[in-house]
Image (cartoon, rainbow, N blue to C red):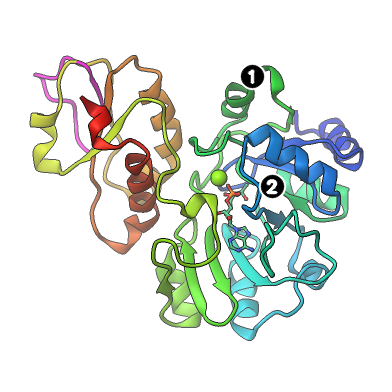
């Protein structure tokens, strides 16, 4: 339901202060009119997200930056020119007209121009900014299909525009462009591509920068305890009660409920990651074992999400 009628109904709901889930190239977003404080409150309520965690505002094009940002530093402009529309979020000094609820009390605002055609059509038809976090309950795995959103919220699910499977499958890369350029979250645009445009980017250390859900250590968690294991230790760590996310074929001796070979291509692996975590979570296993991934730059966003998923399940719970 993302034809003209679907878009028209979504716009009507947004104008009335309601919520609409919509596809982006990264993950599905849970959207509201970014100028409507009550509508923004509904996002926090449905997600169960603590107040004080800022939302990203989605725009149809960089031409609308001036409505939201007080200032656009030259480096931010270069990144926007090169990577928008696309999976990049820029944190910029905030225009005073922006509601505090939206920016979690920060003096800054997160802005992104998504490339997904349904997101683009929705934004253009709506004619304003749409605030949207990932359309999952707080701390859980992000949705990459319309069905994931429906599964996530059940009877409470808002209208969902179905744009198919998200092509990137991991959230946007977030770069803070305030006093210095800072990589807050690795994501859909590899940091090496950003660095080719603006030079070396410092990585935010844990706890640095504003409080932000995707940057808290424990996040993106399935309900089944998940453990990250070095490749050489996978076979020894697996038993008949564990479901496995590996990067190689299922060994003959494996007798557990689900073995996924996610392959060795980081883009493909990232695209499939959240759907795979949902499948593993439903496998009826006592634990999920994930084979750790290479240390190369191309795996940075995947490594980040796996580390956070694992951190949400302290090892003691694994017994
Ligand atoms: O790919 C994405 O970015 C998806 C799609 C829907 O656009 N959205 C997404 O939103 O991942 P969310 O809310 O799940 O994660 C957004 C991250 C959070 O860590 C949030 O705190 C951070 O962006 N953020 C937003 N505004 C910020 C600000 N002013 N300063 C620092 N971080 C900010
Ligand atoms: Mg999220």
Look at the image and tell me whether residue 6 can be seen.
yes
Whether the residue carrying mark 1 lies under 8 Å from ligand 2 is answered with no
Q: Position of residue 11 (x, y in %)?
A: 87, 40
The answer to the question of whether label 1 and label 2 lie on touching residues, with beta carbons closer than 8 A, is: no
To which quarter of the image does residue 309 belong?
A: top left
Question: Pointer 2: what residue?
Answer: 132
Q: How many marks?
A: 2
Residue 245: say if magenta. Answer: yes
Q: Position of residue 132 (x, y in %)?
A: 69, 47
Tell me: 287 left or right of 166. left
Whether the residue carrying mark 2 lies under 8 Å from ligand 1 is answered with yes
Q: Quadrant of the N terminus?
A: top right
Q: Residue at x 72, y 56 (%)?
A: 57
Q: Residue at x 58, y 35 (%)?
A: 136
Look at the image and tell me whether residue 259 can be seen.
no
Question: Pointer 1: what residue?
Answer: 154
To which quarter of the image does residue 96 belong?
A: bottom right
Q: On screen, 144 above or below 110? A: above
**What element does badge 1 sit on?**
helix
Residue 295: say if magenta. Answer: no
Q: On screen, 228 above or below 237? A: below
Q: Main secondary structure of the magenta part?
A: loop
Q: Which residues are magenta?
A: 241-255
């Amino acid at each position: 339901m993302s034809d003209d009628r679907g878009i028209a109904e979504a716009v009507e709901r947004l104008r009335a202060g309601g919520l609409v889930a919509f596809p982006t190239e990264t993950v599905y977003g849970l959207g509201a009119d970014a100028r409507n404080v009550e509508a923004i409150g509904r996002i926090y309520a449905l997600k169960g997200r603590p107040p004080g965690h800022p939302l990203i505002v989605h725009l149809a094009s960089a031409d609308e930056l001036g409505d939201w940002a007080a200032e656009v530093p030259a480096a931010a402009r270069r990144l926007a020119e090169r990577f928008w529309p696309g999976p990049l979020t820029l944190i910029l000094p905030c225009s005073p007209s922006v509601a505090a609820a939206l920016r979690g009390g920060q003096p800054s605002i997160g802005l992104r121009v998504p490339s997904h055609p349904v997101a683009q059509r929705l934004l253009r038809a709506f004619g304003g900014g749409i605030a949207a976090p990932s359309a999952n309950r707080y701390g859980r795995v992000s949705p990459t299909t319309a069905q994931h959103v429906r599964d996530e919220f059940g009877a409470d699910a808002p209208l969902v525009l179905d744009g198919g499977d998200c092509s990137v499958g991991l959230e946007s890369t977030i770069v803070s462009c305030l006093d210095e350029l800072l990589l807050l979250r690795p994501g859909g645009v590899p940091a090496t591509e950003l660095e080719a445009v603006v030079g070396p980017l410092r990585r935010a250390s844990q706890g640095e920068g504003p409080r932000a859900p995707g940057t808290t250590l424990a996040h993106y968690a399935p309900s089944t305890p998940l453990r990250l294991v070095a490749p050489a230790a996978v076979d020894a760590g697996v038993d008949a009660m564990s479901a496995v996310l590996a990067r190689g074929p299922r060994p003959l001796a494996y007798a557990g409920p689900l073995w996924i070979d996610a392959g060795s291509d980081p883009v493909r692996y990232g695209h499939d990651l959240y759907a795979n975590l949902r499948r593993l979570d439903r496998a009826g296993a006592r634990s999920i074992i994930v084979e750790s991934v290479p240390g190369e730059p191309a795996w940075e966003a995947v490594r980040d999400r796996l580390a956070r998923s694992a951190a949400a399940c302290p090892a003691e719970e694994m017994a």
